[in-house]
């Protein structure tokens, strides 16, 4: 059950919720007016969703580790090293995302989309450059669909 929730959440977030935040439908719902770009609000919404996603991933990882521990204590069953290593790696990646990456993104987002800052100042912010060949307009025009 835990594995189904864990995998289902990853698939839903990656292919459902994530792209929906940057869709034309979301832009129509928010009705953002210049000078603040739509991507500023979409990015803020995405940050909230990513924070919840990381927490769900962490809870699922801890439940899986407790399940492995319970099998060891009650049944004397040792987990295979490969599966245990994969589980520990997934939990570590989730911890890095939750406690290092997410706070860093929250800090950089206002800097990147600060309309009162100069273009050079915004681009000087880490992560402030566009993806080559992909613009914010591509995101709004359904590139992610």
Image (tube, helix red, strand yellow):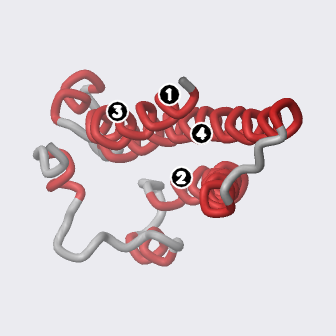
- In the image, taking residue 70 as reference, residue 100 lies left or right, namely left
Q: Mark 4, residues whose alpha carbon is within 10 Å: few (<14), some, or many (≥20)?
A: many
Compute the Cα span from label 3 to label 1. Answer: 15 Å
Q: Position of residue 62 (x, y in %)?
A: 73, 38
Q: Earlier in the sequence, mark 1 or mark 2?
A: 1
Which type of secondary structure does the marked residue at label 3 adopt? helix
Which type of secondary structure does the marked residue at label 2 adopt? helix
Residue at the disc numbered 1? 5
Compute the Cα span from label 3 to label 4. Answer: 15 Å
Residue at left offset 14%, top offset 51%: 143
Q: Earlier in the sequence, mark 4 or mark 2?
A: 4
Does residue 33 appear in the picture of this structure?
no
Residue at the disc numbered 3? 17
Q: Position of residue 52 (x, y in %)?
A: 58, 33
Which of 23 and 77 lies nearest the eye of the viewer?
A: 77
Quadrant for residue 138, please give it: bottom left
Label at residue 110: 2
Q: Position of residue 136 (x, y in %)?
A: 24, 56
Residues marked 4 and 2 touching at CB (< 8 Å): no
Residue at the disc numbered 4? 57
The C terminus - image quarter = top left
Does residue 79 appear in the picture of this structure?
yes
Q: Mark 1, residues whose alpha carbon is within 10 Å: few (<14), some, or many (≥20)?
A: few
Q: Nearer the viewer, mark 4 or mark 2?
A: 4
């Amino acid at each position: 059950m835990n594995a189904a929730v864990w995998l289902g959440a990853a698939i839903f977030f990656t292919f459902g919720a994530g792209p929906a935040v940057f869709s034309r439908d979301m832009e129509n719902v928010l009705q953002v007016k210049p000078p603040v770009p739509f991507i500023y609000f979409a990015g803020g919404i995405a940050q909230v969703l990513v924070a919840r996603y990381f927490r769900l991933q962490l809870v699922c990882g801890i439940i899986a580790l407790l399940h492995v521990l319970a099998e060891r204590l009650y049944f004397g069953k040792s987990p295979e090293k490969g599966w245990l290593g994969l589980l520990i790696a997934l939990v570590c990646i989730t911890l890095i995302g939750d406690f290092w990456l997410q706070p860093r993104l929250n800090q950089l987002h206002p800097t990147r989309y600060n309309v009162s800052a100069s273009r050079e100042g915004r681009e000087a912010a880490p992560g402030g450059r566009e993806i080559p060949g992909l613009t914010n307009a591509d995101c709004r025009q359904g590139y992610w669909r």
